[in-house]
Each structure stands twice: as structure tokens, then as C-alpha cells.
Image (cartoon, rainbow, N blue to C red):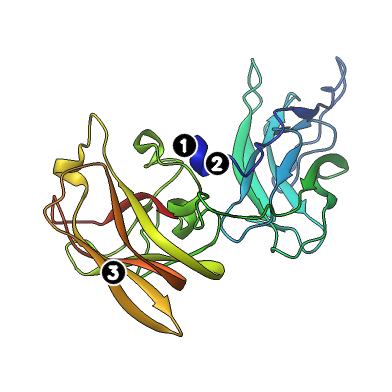
Amino acid sequence: MSPRSRRLLPAATAVVAALVIAAPADGAAGRQDPHGSGGASVGLAAEPGALDLVPLPCYPVTFQATMVNTGRQDVFADMTLTAPAPVALSRDLFSSYLPAEEPDQPVSAPVEVTAPRDTPPGTYDVRLAVDRERLTVPVHVRPVPEKGPGDNLALGEQAFASSTHGNFSVCGGVDGNPDSADWSTLTGWNDGTSRVFPDSYGVRLDQPRTVGEVTVHTLDSERNPAAGFGLRDWDVQVQRDGAWRTVAEVRGNTAGAVTSRFEETEAEAVQLVIHASNDGSYSRVVELEVH
């Protein structure tokens, strides 16, 4: 991950929180409930067990919520997840069938945590519950750092697109991670209209900013090189007073990262208008940087 892109934001605290409820003693009859955990037979865990969150529109932090059947009978468990406003979660329910196996088999689901820019700094407790069992994941909301000369103005700001493939998030191209190795699972943006161009992908800045440089990281890995799968032709546009203006053009690209420099101008938003990819199918942006 690019230090230049990520230097403003702290990483999540790498702590594991867990609460495991002991299985019934020998001879005790566990209750099998097709719609509940059956009492004290489900363990809860979260990793990391505490989070640091900078409240930006497109900079979520993620933890893995885990359930494990520590009893002797199969159960179907419903985990509820709640957070105090204005902190928001990507899910409020995690349901799973939990077979009684040896060794115990944990079942996990990712949970994204976000908060609006004006969220007061402090600690907000995300609460996980299965029946009477509880687990708390503290979320430490930090002040939003100022962005200045040399910083990536797109980092964590609100992204938008003409369409987004169902396996991706529109925020994936402004999360500070330009590594193509993570593109298909953790980061990046992919449009949702195969073999239909043009596509667009952009970011709204936090306030009107003076910009003069845009870097585009497109898909480029050993398995999927840019010459075969990356963006080929696109325009860089800036928005001012609601109107879009083209400030740079890229044609015939085969590189994984391309920086376009242009006369500095005030912009409310920046977007790519993508005319073609090298495989003619999808537009793939791993990271968009604005300086």
C-alpha cells in the first residue's frame, strides 16, 4: 500500500476480542433450536477486537464477526449487530448454520464500519449478540486530518461511477490501496456493464481544491497485466461550478500507473471518462489519486 496515499490515516488496532461459552457438561442435554443458538453453546469473536476510524465517506474499517458452535448439537444462530448513531454498519444481522464438529468450526462474515465526517471524536461501542451472549467491539473515532499540498485529495472522499459490478464497491478506488494483488477481493473498482463504453469513475472532493495532477492505477498484476486487462483510453475531467472540463487525455495505455499533469485549476470533483480497456470488456480502476 502506498505510504503517500495512506500516511494520513491510522490502521485498525490489531487486537482480537472473543467470548466463548463453555459446552454443556457431560450428561447435560443441549437444546436444539432450528431458529436460535440453543442457549449457551455459541462462542462470539471479532478480529480485530478494536478499531480506529477516520470518519470519511469512503474510508470504512472492517472487522470479522465470528460465531462458533461449542456445544454438542447442531444449531442455527442469528447474530445481531448494533452501533450507536451516527456510526453505521454494513449489516445488522449475521445468520448461519453451525454444525457440532470436532474441532470447532468458526463461521465469519466481514462487517464494514463507517461514520459521517462530522462525527464527534470518541469511542463508540459496536455490540454483537446471540441470544443472551454479548460481545463489544470499541470503535475509536479520530479527528479528520487536514489535507494539504502533496496529499492525495481523493483519499476516502465520496466516489461515484456510471455503474459498479456487484462484486465491488464504488469506494474501492479511493481507499488508498493501489495494489493490484488485492483488486479482486479487497480493493478497486470494476464497472457493471461489460463491453459497453464509455464508463465513468470519479470522486467528489471535500471542498473546492486546487488540483494539477491525477494518477490512475489500473489492473496490473503478473496474472492480469495492464497490457491485457487495464484501462487503455480515457479522459481526465474536473468539475467547477457544476460543469465538467477535460484537462488531460490518455490513449493507447499499457502501463499499470499513469500520471497526468495539467495546469492547476480549482475543482469540486474529478472524474475519468473511460473509452476503452485493453480487453474490451470492463473498466478496472485499482486506485484514483488527485494531488
Q: Which residue is drawn at 26% across and 57% down?
A: 283
Q: Quadrant of the C terminus?
A: bottom left
In the image, residue 253 above or below residue 63: below
Residue at disc 2, secondary structure: helix
What amino acid type is highlighted by mark number 2?
Arg
Residue 235 in percent (x, y) is at: 24, 66
Q: Earlier in the sequence, mark 3 or mark 1?
A: 1
Q: Which residue is drawn at 51% across and 57% down?
A: 153
Residue 253 in percent (x, y) is at: 16, 50
Where, by quadrant of the figure, is residue 70 drawn?
Answer: top right
Which dot marks residue 247?
3
The answer to whether the residues at label 1 and label 2 have Cβ atoms under 8 Å apart is yes
Mark-to-mark CA distance, 3 and 1: 25 Å
Mark 1 sits on what residue? 2
What amino acid type is highlighted by mark number 3?
Val
In the image, residue 197 above or below residue 70: below
The answer to whether the residues at label 3 and label 2 have Cβ atoms under 8 Å apart is no
Which dot marks residue 259?
none
